[in-house]
Amino acid sequence: MQIRFFIYAARGAMTIDRREFLQATAAIAATGVVARSVGDAHAKAPLQTAQNASFYRFKTGDIEVTSITDGGIDLELRLFPNADKAEAEAILAKTGRPKTGSPASINAFIVNTGGKLIVVDTGTGTFFGPQAGLFAANLSASGYSPDQVDAVIITHMHPDHLGGLTKADGKPAFANAQILVNEDDYKFWTDEVITAKAPDEAKPFFRFAQATMKAYEGKVERFRDGTEFAPGVTAVAAPGHTPGHTMIRVSSGKSSLLIWGDIVHATALQFARPEWAISFDSDQAAAVATRKKVFDQVSGSGTMVAGAHLDFPGIGFVARESSGYSYHPAFWSPKL
Ligand SMILES: [Zn+2]
């Protein structure tokens, strides 16, 4: 049987048979073109230093969800006071991470119900410096402008979640959005007595949250557990990390997604060891209890989760193991 080869040349596709092909390649080899090594290439391409615009889009039923990266942060092992150092280092080594700690993504999510464009968390803004603060650029790269946003839901009032609400000059980044924060979180982070008693290293968190709320004076609305922000988009209380820490359930048809804020900070460590709290937790015991309860629920139901600090794009599934749990990133689909 004759083997046909297809060559696509500038003048169009043509076919040649195997004998012609071998003659042609022999002729090319004689010119030295085939023998040329990589080192003889004409141009030295400079290394590229920029990462691609980072968003990932998927559907939950009829609702479109876009994961947006704001950047990353290194979570040093010392931030997990209950962790057994040797065991933690072994887990980090096994998962290819530095043994000094775990890099964590900073993710935010855009929920487009068709009727409403909702942003869930906004990254760090300028609070963490140049290692993060990419939310605004990646929101635009994903096809949306901040002026289109109807509402911003804040899972909790830490600076890596509400930082992107304001621009570098402290002015609102979202001209037309209502800002939705949990009632208990709002009370905690804007309370002057609690602020005064907070350790010095925590005071900037309080002051930043207060300045951000002031920038949106008259546009902030406080919500409670169970509030429905739009059809299929609901608040689910998950206290511990902060007093009003909230997950957002997105439901459409038979599909469901749980955007869970900071249930997990270190992907490599806290599925295996849910009891290893992070020192940023307002109430570590409550945060651990909430994490275990949520792991139980989503591993039992097979619900997809989306995490603010899970490895970008931060969506996947939780499975129960004989000891602890494991995390399984969702398949990267080229199609919506
Ligand atoms: Zn966070």
Image (spheres, rainbow, N blue to C red):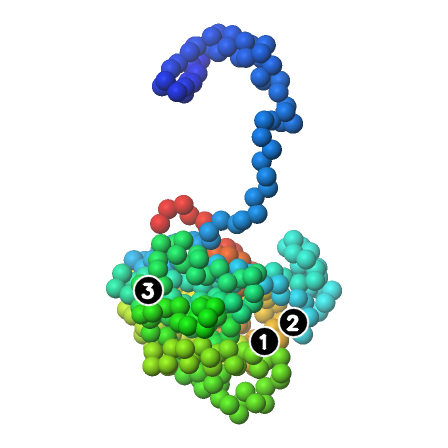
Mark in front: 3 vs 2:
3
Label 1 close to label 2 by CB (< 8 Å): yes
Q: Which residue is mark 1?
A: 280
Q: Is residue 320 left or right of residue 136?
A: right
Mark in front: 3 vs 1:
3
Closer to the chain start, of discs 1 and 2, is 2
Please rate how many residues cluster around mark 2, counting C-alpha atoms within 10 Å: few if below 14, some from 14 to 19, many from 20.
some
- The image quadrant of residue 5 is top left
Please rate how many residues cluster around mark 1, counting C-alpha atoms within 10 Å: few if below 14, some from 14 to 19, many from 20.
some
Q: Is mark 1 within 8 Å of ligand 1?
A: yes
- The image quadrant of residue 41 is top right
Please rate how many residues cluster around mark 3, counting C-alpha atoms within 10 Å: few if below 14, some from 14 to 19, many from 20.
few
| Horizontal and vertical percent position of residue 292 | 53, 72
Residue in the picture at 35% in, 58% down: 144
Residue in the picture at 28% in, 65% down: 116
Closer to the chain start, of discs 3 and 2, is 2
Task: Say the numbered circle drawn on residue 79.
Answer: 2
Task: Say the numbered circle drawn on residue 235.
Answer: none
Q: Is residue 238 visible?
A: no
Q: Which residue is mark 3?
A: 147
- The image quadrant of residue 121 is bottom left
| Horizontal and vertical percent position of residue 271 | 57, 64
Q: Residue furthest left?
A: 115
Vertical comparison of 155 with 321: above or below: below
Distance between the alpha carbons at the discs numbered 3 and 2: 37 Å
Looking at numbered disc 2 in the image, what kind of residue is underneath it?
Answer: Leu
Instruction: Between residue 284 and residue 147, name the one nearer to us.
Output: 147
Closer to the chain start, of discs 3 and 1, is 3
Looking at numbered disc 1 in the image, what kind of residue is underneath it?
Answer: Phe
